[in-house]
């Protein structure tokens, strides 16, 4: 568990997270001290999959809204707004209790810095 938390602390926006249960890594789009929102392309449908990592609960999964949040998770701005909503006590959005899985970070792949 401590190793998972250390890897979480190392992940920055622009890095990639490889989960043990997934073949393809996710791109970190937004993060704060508690949450990371990461996406990966779903090319066959020309869309994306997203996951929200909750370090306090040590789980990841989709949000708890039936049709996702109205803003979606398609770009960095939408993901930053979602981080704000996740931390807002007035808002009902959270990582789904029904559809979450235990956190299984295999590694964090640091983004290459431009020369």
Image (tube, rainbow, N blue to C red):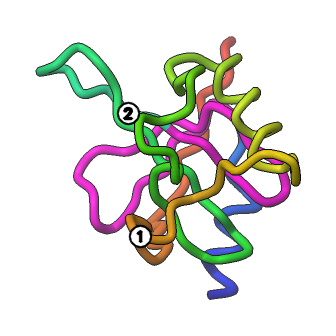
Q: Is residue 55 magenta?
A: no
Task: Classify residue 76 by image quadrant.
Answer: top right
Nearer to us of marks 2 and 1 is: 1
Nearer to the camera, 46 or 106: 46
**x 56%, y 51%: residue:** 52
Q: Is residue 35 magenta?
A: yes
Which element is circle 1 on? Answer: loop
* Residue 32, position as x, y percentages in the image: 82, 48
Q: Is residue 102 above or below residue 79?
A: below
Q: Position of residue 84 (x, y in %)?
A: 82, 37
**Residue 58 sits in quarter:** bottom right
At horizontal 46% and vertical 51% (from top left) the residue drawn is: 62
Q: Earlier in the sequence, mark 2 or mark 1?
A: 2
Q: Which residues are magenta?
A: 13-38
Residue found at the far left of this picture:
44
Q: CA distance from mark 2 to mark 1?
A: 22 Å
Please indicate whether residue 91 sits to the left or right of residue 54 in the image: right
Q: Residue 41, image x and y in percent?
A: 32, 26
Which residue in the protein does label 2 denote? 40
- Kindly state the secondary structure of the residue where label 2 is placed: strand
- Identify the residue shown where x is 34% and y is 27%: 48
Q: Position of residue 54 (x, y in %)?
A: 65, 64
In which quadrant of the rendered image does the C terminus lie? Answer: top right
Q: What residue is at 23 percent from the left and 14 percent from the top? A: 46
**Label 2 packing within 10 angstroms: few (<14), some (14-19), many (20+):** some
105 is higher (above) or lower (below) than 92: below
- The quarter in which the N terminus is drawn is bottom right
Q: What residue is shown with label 1?
A: 98
Q: Which mark is residue 35?
A: none
Q: Please determine whether, in this image, residue 71 is positioned above or below residue 14.
A: above
């Amino acid at each position: 568990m401590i190793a998972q938390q250390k890897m979480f602390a190392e992940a920055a926006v622009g890095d990639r997270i490889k989960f043990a249960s997934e073949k393809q890594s996710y791109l970190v789009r937004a993060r704060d001290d508690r949450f990371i929102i990461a996406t990966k392309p779903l090319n066959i449908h020309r869309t994306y999959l997203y996951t929200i990592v909750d370090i306090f609960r040590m789980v990841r999964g989709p949000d708890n809204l039936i049709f996702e949040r109205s803003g979606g998770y398609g770009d960095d701005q939408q993901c930053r707004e979602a981080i704000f909503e996740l931390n807002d006590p007035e808002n009902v959005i959270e990582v789904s209790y029904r559809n979450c899985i235990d956190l299984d970070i295999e590694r964090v792949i640091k983004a290459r810095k431009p020369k």
